[in-house]
Image (spheres, rainbow, N blue to C red):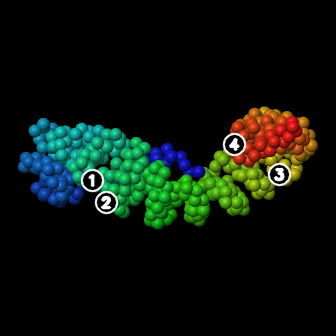
Amino acid sequence: MIRDEKMMRNGLFAILISAVLVAAPAQAQLYPLSENDWNNPEFVARYLGSYGVDMELSPEVSPIEATTMSDLAPFIEDDVEAGIFFLEPKITPESSAAMDYMLGQLYLENSQPEQAIESYNRAIRKFPNFLRAYKNIALAYMQQDNCEGAMPHLNKVLELGRGDGLTYGFLGYCYVEQEKYSSSMTAYGNARLIEPDKTNWKIGFAQAALQARKFQDAIVAFEELIREKPDDSTYLMLQTNAYLSIDEDENAISNLEVLNRLGASTGMSLTLLGDLYIRQEIPSLALRSYMAALNADGRPDFARASRAVEFFAQQERWQNAGNYLNQLKSVYGNSLTGTDEIAMLTMEAQIMQGNGEFAAAVPLLNDAVRRDPMNGKALLLLAQNHKNAGDYERAELYYDRAANIDEVAYDALTDNARMAVSFRRLERALNLLTQASNLRPSSTLDNNIRIIQNALNAQGG
């Protein structure tokens, strides 16, 4: 299943933050040169970010500083580095915080976030309630993916009562990084209220809901994203993960089939679809999906692909298992070595036995055990083979060997116990079932143990 939480967090959230930061230079946006006049109050307001902001939250610009900034305007349009060189020596401890802020803007625009942070910090020291400086220093930290540095400044923006969508969105991202998923949902929820059409905040909220295990919230959020971008396979897959987390297999299947129709399926999504059809006991559709997975982009590795054989075997769908194994061999056969090659031998023998070809399976199983004495599945199959042939002593030997291997121990013990009961070896059967119960307790085993114990007590009486 698609449940790699670390991957989801570092993968899609990395996409999210990069998408936000691509748009972020709007904080220091360049305007047409004809408007770049520091005698133009509208331009000053735009560039310094004081549009609609109380003077309590933005410093005043002196006439001399306004002239300096007016002289700076051509550099902003044509040569930011030259603008930095022009402005830097004009900043003094006595100059306005707006001058330091302006230098920070230029550094940020020139992809120098560390220098921008220094300039914004000087501006804040001079004017402690400088709202735009807090916003942009947070942005500079976020460009470095440094939530620890950004969060105090983001919270200061909220303290000043001027939280906007970007502020809440960045907080949502940072709370995810801190694994505070409920707080992240709240922050992203606020970002969505302020900027309801912003896709990044919808993605962030849905992801945070997944991490918080608020799967219904995640499903609803992804549904909105899917409606907006029905061809985007990422949202379908993430919503599928949420459906699987609450065992809504039918909805998960529906999503995966939509992916298939869009031509966006991968080997792993088709393999997952096959697994779900197995759970729904629709083997024909499972086989179709598993077969398609072997020829799709990003097909699963052999170990993952071969699990389908075991699923069909558990349901005794031997024809399905055989058809799939033939396809598996044609795709992977020439490249298999070591344990994978032995696994292929074992699966082939298992299908032979399922079809009643016990004698033909023996050489394959002997070869598998010779090459890997700890191959529990092959040992268990050999035990069943010898039991079927009436060679109970040899069957018991292989059952005992298989019982020492965790992968098949439970099946070996219960199978061996049934064989012991058939020969009225009740004490041995009781011992085997007790061992099995220690591995995997169940009411059925408890009942069988009680029946055998009562039979032994009766014999003793």
Instruction: Please give the residue where the numbered disc 3 appears in the rendered image.
Output: 354
Q: How many marks?
A: 4
Q: Distance of mark 4 from mark 3, alpha carbons?
A: 28 Å
Q: Distance of mark 3 from mark 2, alpha carbons?
A: 62 Å
Q: Are marks 4 and 3 in contact (CB under 8 Å)?
A: no
When asked about the image quadrant of residue 145, the answer is top left
Is 447 situated left or right of 87 in this image? right
Disc 1 residue type? Gly
Residue 444 rendering spot, x and y as whole percentages: 74, 47
Circle 1 residues within 10 Å: few <14, some 14–19, many ≥20: some
Q: Distance of mark 2 from mark 4, alpha carbons?
A: 54 Å
Instruction: Please give the residue where the numbered disc 2 appears in the rendered image.
Output: 194
Marked residue nearer the N-terminal end (3 or 1): 1
Determine which of the numbered discs, if any, sits on residue 163 in the image: 1
| Residue located at (26% from left, 50% from top) | 158
Secondary structure of residue under mark 3: helix
Q: Distance of mark 1 from mark 2, alpha carbons?
A: 9 Å
Disc 2 residue type? Ile
Marked residue nearer the N-terminal end (3 or 2): 2
Instruction: Please give the residue where the numbered disc 4 appears in the rendered image.
Output: 441
Marked residue nearer the N-terminal end (4 or 3): 3
Residue 177 rendering spot, x and y as whole percentages: 41, 44
